[in-house]
Image: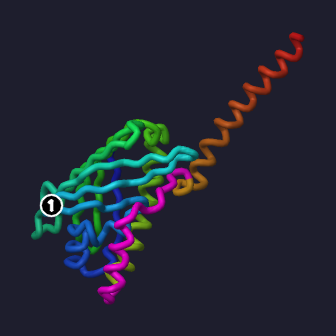
Amino acid sequence: MKLTHSFVSPAPAEDVWEALLDPERVAPCLPGATLTSVDGKTFNGEVKVKLGPVQLLYRGSGEFVEIDPVLRRAVMKAAGKDARGNGTASATVTFQVGDTVEVETDLSVTGRPAQLGRGLISEVSGKLVDQFAECLASTLGSVDPDEVAQQQHLRVVPDEPIDLIDTAGVPVLKRVLPVAAAVLAVVLFVVLRRRRQR
């Protein structure tokens, strides 16, 4: 599944570029994510995902496989697996920084989150990118080193899970309610039919 997003660079392009290449700086802007280690171009982390009553914990790693400082373009590959074996996720993310940040993601998801479907995943990812851009703007706008350090320190412990249903909001309800109504209608039909047969 390919997803494309863009947002206006919240700071000079060179500053944004440097920040995006530093997992410790951007981790606080990733909902549900916890950065556990960084070693050069590779990093490890966890992402908590909530899907209704179900909570998933993905553990995985990522690596910058291409970095072009002239074009300010980079390619990152990441993959993770739910701790209980309920699904996997992998992505190749390409981003380029200029007056805007252009992001292209080739995403593969299995398990429960995949049940959301392409449309909802696209809507959720779009909102997450917007949240990320707002947080990045706030982070780059901070000139207080202690504040930046505190934001990074918060990621030492697992963050609150990202609630996919809550993030999607109304679009999910528009899709879920008709299905729920149809299921309810079938249940009522079966119940009434059994009563009549008695």
Across and down, in percent, residue 64 comes to 17, 57
The segment highlighted magenta reads 142-165
Q: Seen from this angle, which residue lies furthest front? A: 157
112 in relation to 146, above or below: above
Residue 96: image quadrant is bottom left
For the residue pair 11 and 150, the one nearer the viewer reads as 150
Relative to 7, 61 lies left or right:
left
- Write the residue at 43% across / 58% down: 126
Q: Name the residue under label 1.
A: 41
For the residue pair 135 and 70, the one nearer the viewer reads as 135
Across and down, in percent, residue 59 comes to 32, 49
54 in relation to 104, above or below: above
Q: Seen from this angle, which residue lies furthest top? A: 197
Looking at the rendered image, the quarter that the N terminus falls into is: top left
Check disc 1 and give the amino acid type.
Lys
Across and down, in percent, residue 88 comes to 34, 40
Q: Residues within 10 Å of mark 1 (few under 14, many from 20)?
A: some
- Write the residue at 39% across / 71% down: 154
Looking at the rendered image, the quarter that the C terminus falls into is: top right
- Is disc 1 placed on a helix, strand or loop? loop
Q: Is residue 156 magenta?
A: yes
- Write the residue at 83% across / 17% down: 193
Residue 93: image quadrant is bottom left
- Write the residue at 46% across / 38% down: 112
